[in-house]
Amino acid sequence: MKDRALSTLGLWVVVGLVIWVGGFFSVAEQAAFGLLALLVGAAQYEFHQLAARIPGVGRPSPTGIVAGFVLLFALFFLANERARANAVLTLGALLFGLHLLARLRRPGEVPTLLRRFPTLYGFAYIPFMLASLVAIARMEDGQLLSRQPIGLYYVVWVVVATKFTDVGGLLIGVPFGRHKLAPTISPAKSWEGCAGGLAFSAAASALFAWICVGPLGLPFMTPAKAALMALPLAALSIPSDLVESVFKRLAGAKDSGATIPGIGGALDLIDSLVLTAPTALVLLSYGLDWAKRG
């Protein structure tokens, strides 16, 4: 737990430095995008390694990773069809998200889509689902792919709401967890940890919103509504994390990698964002005006 805590603290310091230093040189969005692209590429590579170890699944092609970078760069630099990009990301993420959730009902079964199209599966699972974060970074007042840097703070809010669910689940679930959530998939997770995760997510989201509208003076969500909108993200971050556990069990692996002490690999770091990122895009696209009203 000590290694995990230190790694988590170190990662938040990195995120803060990227935004602060990038803001000082007026390249905060570009710096954050570079960090996201690096994490997505590393996570997709790790998924390729896992997929190759699953019986009946061939090794995915590196072209999937290239396609992932092309998608992210296109959204960040080139896209100007706001409504169309929003619709494609939302509809595609909804369909694939439902497929991922279905994996939790049959955790020992290798998905047919993964067996037949492992490269496409890796592309859909990681860069396509996480591309919503790029769309959010370009968002202001519910308009997708605008050029306002305020969108970067919404991305941080998504990460806060998602990752503090993990923190609450760990701090509450370890000492008080008695009722197992999914013992065949992730024996350490408990219903008590889930409740703690939701509470920590809401509290951290409210605090972050207060910092944005108070000390930073940004046109952000009110703290109460930021906490309320964090709850569906917190709830979905839990099955999102379980989905990766299913793939790791199919591959006979404990972690996706060993680059981050106490956490594992890049995929272990961002797995809970797979379902929360597209959900946040929908929430912010249709609820941002409401969330800003006091």
Image (cartoon, grey):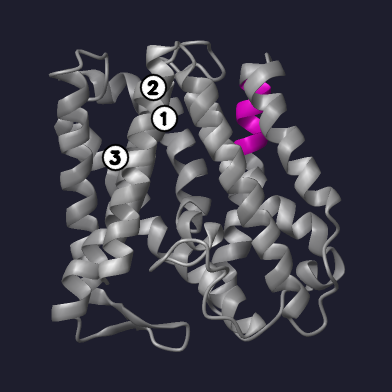
Asked which secondary structure carries label 1, the reply is: helix
Between residues 133 and 11, which one lies in front from this camera angle?
11
Asked which secondary structure carries label 2, the reply is: helix
Residue type, mark 3 in image: Met
Number of numbered tags placed on the structure image: 3
Q: CA distance from mark 2 to mark 1?
A: 6 Å
Between residues 244 and 259, which one lies in front from this camera angle?
259
Residue type, mark 1 in image: Val
According to the image, label 2 marks what residue? 21
- Residue 85 falls inside the magenta stretch: yes
Q: Tell me the residue at 80%/55% (across/down).
A: 120
Determine whether 41 is above or below 49 in the image: above
According to the image, label 3 marks what residue? 229
Binning the other alpha carbons within 10 Å of mark 3 as few (below 14), some (14 to 19) or many (20 upward) gives: many
In the image, is 178 to the left or to the right of 47? left
Principal secondary structure, stretch drawn in magenta = helix
The percent position of residue 171, horizontal first and vertical second, equals 18, 68
User: Which residues fall within the magenta stretch?
Assistant: 83-90
Looking at the rendered image, the quarter that the C terminus falls into is top left
- Which numbered tag is attached to residue 18? 1
Q: Earlier in the sequence, mark 1 or mark 3?
A: 1
Q: Tell me the residue at 63%/31% (across/down).
A: 87
- Which numbered tag is attached to residue 219? none
Q: CA distance from mark 2 to mark 3?
A: 29 Å
Binning the other alpha carbons within 10 Å of mark 2 as few (below 14), some (14 to 19) or many (20 upward) gives: few
Contact check, label 2 and label 3, Cβ < 8 Å: no
The percent position of residue 31, horizontal first and vertical second, equals 51, 26
Q: Is residue 263 visible?
A: yes
